[in-house]
Image (spheres, rainbow, N blue to C red):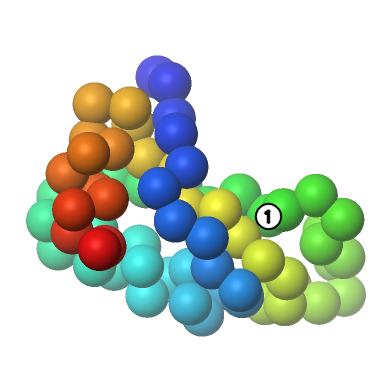
Amino acid sequence: MHLVKVAYARNLAEAELIQGLLRQEHIPSMLKRNGGADVPDFIAAGARDVLVPVSQADRARELLA
């Protein structure tokens, strides 16, 4: 499955909020920590990209706009 970035979140809480909005519309998503922000001691800190299947990207972007 090919995934594309549809949103950027500044931290885990913001990323999970975006995921929740997508989940309500039955759009699967995955979070990916940005490079340089992967510090195990700070699990909730650091930026995240929100990824969805390419087939759902347009719908996800409309929802998040």
**52 relative to 40, above or below:** above
Quadrant of the rendered structure where residue 36 is? bottom right
Q: How many numbered circles does the render carry?
A: 1
Whole-percent x, y for residue 47 in the image:
67, 66
Q: Which residue is mark 1?
A: 33
Whole-percent x, y for residue 58 in the image:
22, 39
Q: Which residue is located at x 33 percent, y 27 percent?
A: 54
**3 relative to 63, above or below:** above
**23 relative to 2, above or below:** below
Secondary structure of the residue carrying numbered label 1: strand
Whole-percent x, y for residue 55 in the image:
24, 26
Q: Using residue 41 as the reference point, say whether residue 11 is left or right of it.
A: left
Depth check, front residue: 47 or 13:
47
Q: Using residue 59 as the reference point, say whether residue 20 is left or right of it.
A: right
Depth check, front residue: 37 or 44:
37
Q: Which residue is located at x 37 percent, y 75 percent?
A: 17
Question: From where the camera sits, is residue 47 visible?
Answer: yes
Name the quadrant of the C terminus.
Answer: bottom left
- Given the current orientation, which residue lies at the most extreme top position? 1
Question: From where the camera sits, is residue 23 visible?
Answer: no
Quadrant of the rendered structure where residue 33 is? bottom right
Name the quadrant of the N terminus.
Answer: top left
Instruction: Look at label 1 and name its amino acid.
Output: Arg
- Given the current orientation, which residue lies at the most extreme front position? 65
Are there few (<14), some (14-19), or many (20+) residues within 10 Å of tag 1?
A: some
Q: Using residue 20 as the reference point, say whether residue 16 is left or right of it.
A: right
Whole-percent x, y for residue 18 in the image:
36, 67
